[in-house]
Image (cartoon, grey):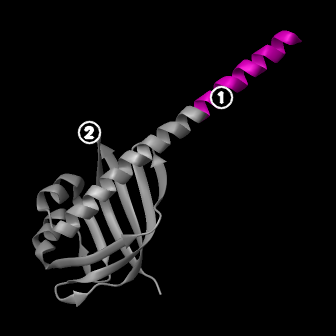
Amino acid sequence: MSISYRTLVTIFSLIMSTALFAEEKTEAQNAELLKAVKKLDMAFSKRDKETIREMTDPNHLSIAPAFQFFNRADQLKALPELKLTKFEAEHKKIIHTTPRTALITYEANIEGTFAGKELTKHVQILESWVKRNGKWIETSYQETPLP
């Protein structure tokens, strides 16, 4: 009977240590992803085409009340029309759909214009990211107006 008890304790310990390790890995993964998100946000604020090109997928989809782009090339062509004066994001919720993909949702308060048109001030944002060759790349971005 004591052998079975020891076996159960050992198995339980292995399961718990694996779960704790996975949680730590996710926290580290989230920190790395959030760093990439911040870098890309800054690139859009500064209209930094090279960083945006490096950090977005060629088939990047970007939909907001003020614009729609169905690839990175079109978005980069229109980038001079984007003038952000404020982009304040609230707490970001990250959902890892696989070890190499993630969805990020959050609310943001935005001020600025695109092609002379006012941007929606309060939005819900959904971003899709994938890790390729050790780097997080954004594959899509969507803004939905909030009251």
Decide if residue 90 is on the left or right side of residue 130. Answer: right
Q: Which residue is mark 1?
A: 15
Q: Quadrant of residue 75?
A: bottom left
Circles 1 and 2: CB atoms closer than 8 Å = no
Q: Residue at x 23, y 54 (%)?
A: 55
Decide if residue 23 is on the left or right side of residue 142. Answer: right
Q: Quadrant of the N terminus?
A: top right
Q: Is residue 43 magenta?
A: no
10 Å crowding of disc 1: few (<14), some (14-19), many (20+): few
Q: Can residue 28 be seen at all in this image of the molecule?
A: yes
SS at circle 2? loop
What's the magenta region? Answer: 1-19
Q: Which residue is mark 2?
A: 133
Q: Residue at x 59, y 29 (%)?
A: 18
Q: Callout 1, which amino acid?
A: Ile
Residue 44 in the image: state x and y as whole percent.
Answer: 21, 66
Q: Is residue 14 magenta?
A: yes
10 Å crowding of disc 2: few (<14), some (14-19), many (20+): few
